[in-house]
Amino acid sequence: MRLLLVLLIPLALCLGGCADLSYLSQSVGGHLRLMSAARPVNEWLADSATSPALRTRLEQSQRMRDFAIAELHLPDNRSYRSYADLHRSAAVWNVVAAPELSLSPKTWCFPIMGCVSYRGYFDQAAARQMGDQLKAEGWEVMVYPVPAYSTLGWTSDPLLSTFIGYQEGVLAGMIFHELAHQVAYAADDTAFNESFATAVQEMGADAWLQNQGSERAREAYQVDQTRRRQFSALTRDYQVQLTALYTGSLSDGEKRAAKAELMSRLRTDYARLKSDSWQGYAGYDNWFAQTNNASFALLASYTDGVPDFKTLFEREGRDWPRFYAEVKRLAALPKAQRHAELTSEIQ
C-alpha cells in the first residue's frame, strides 16, 4: 500500500469526490495514529521495559538500515529509525478484486498518486465491508493483512511490531523492499512498482546474509526461499493456464467449468507439494484456501516483473546507483512504453 502524505491536502480530498472522502480520511487518520505511536529506536533501547528479544531485533534492524545505505545505496533518511507497537496483527488490510473470468485487477484512482490495484484500510472490519460490497457486485475478492507500507518518503516510516519479529533474512528484505519504493514510483503501475521493490528485497536480503548474516540465518532464509520458489513455480503454471482459458474461445459456462477443475487441481498439487517437499509446512494454507482470480492478480503484481529487474541489475554491472537511475528513467515513461523497454532491454 502506498499512502502519500499529500492526501492531507484539502484540495486532494475535494478532487477525490464525496464517494472517496471517507476513505481518504481514514487513510490519513490511520497513518497519523500510526506515526504518533512511533518512538525513536534509541529511546526503545534506553527503556528498561523493552524486552531483551525486542532490543536485539531493534539493534539488528539498525545495522540493516546502515547496510541499506552503505551497500545498497537506498535512501539515507529517518525511515526505519523509529519503532511503533501497533497492538494488532497488521498495519493495514488491503482489498483486491478481479472479475469472475479475468486476472486483471480492479483499480482505484486518486489525485496525485494515480491508480492502484488495491484499496487499503486501517480497520479490518471496514476492509471486510468493502470486500463484501464488491462480492455483491460480482467481483472475486481477496482481503489480506499487510505488515508494512511505504509513504514513498513523504514521512519517516517506522519499524512496526507487525514485522519486527520476522526471521533475519525476511526482516532485512522487508526493510529494503519498502525503502525501494522511495527510490522510484510509477503512477498507475502497481506491477512495475511492486516487482521492482521485490527484486531489491530479494537481492538485498541475499547481500545482507552473505555479508552480515549468521550461518543459521542463511540456512533459515534458504529454506524460506526454496518454498517461495516452489510456490511461485506452481502458481505461475496455473496463472498461465487460467489466462489462456479466460482469453480463449469457450463459452462463459464452459470457462466456469474449466476454471473450477483447474482450481481443484491446483489445491491437489499444493497438498502434494506440502506433503512431499515441505514436511507439512502450512504457511501457504490460507492463500490456497481462499485462492481466486483476485489472489492470482495480486500475486502477479509482486512477482511477474522480478526476473526482468534482476536481469536489468546485471546488465547495469550490478551497480546499484546505475540500476536505480535506469529504473527511474523507465518509471517516467508512459506505461506501455515502460514495459516494452523493460522487457526488450533485457533480451
Image (cartoon, helix red, strand yellow):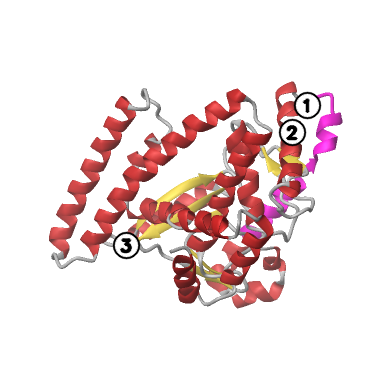
Q: Main secondary structure of the magenta part?
A: helix
Secondary structure beneath label 1:
loop
Q: Pointer 2 and pointer 1: residues touching (CB < 8 Å)? A: yes
Left or right, 174 with respect to 70, comes to left
Position in image of residue 38 (x %, y %): 76, 43
State the SS at label 3: loop
Mark 2 → mark 3, Cα distance in angstroms: 42 Å
Residue wearing tag 3: 99
Q: Say whether disc 1 or disc 3 marks the residue closer to the N-terminus.
A: 1
In the rendering, at what x and y percent does residue 234 appear? Answer: 32, 43
Ranked by sequence position, the earlier of labels 2 and 3 is 2
The magenta stretch spans residue 164: no
- Measure how far apart labels 1 and 3 are at the Cα level: 47 Å
Indicate the quadrant where residue 271 lies. top left
Disc 3 residue crowd, few under 14, some 14–19, many 20+, Cα 10 Å: some
Is disc 1 surrounded by few (<14), some (14 to 19) or many (20+) residues within 10 Å? Answer: few
Q: Is residue 91 visible?
A: no
Q: Which residue is mark 1?
A: 50
Q: Where, quadrant-wise, is the C terminus in this rendering?
A: bottom left
Determine whether 80 is above or below 137 in the image. above
Q: Which residue is mark 2?
A: 58
Q: Residue at x 65, y 65 (%)?
A: 325
Q: Report the span colored magenta.
A: 26-50
State the residue at coordinates (54%, 51%).
Answer: 199
| Local crowd size for mark 2, using a 10 Å CA cut-off: few (<14), some (14–19), many (≥20) | many
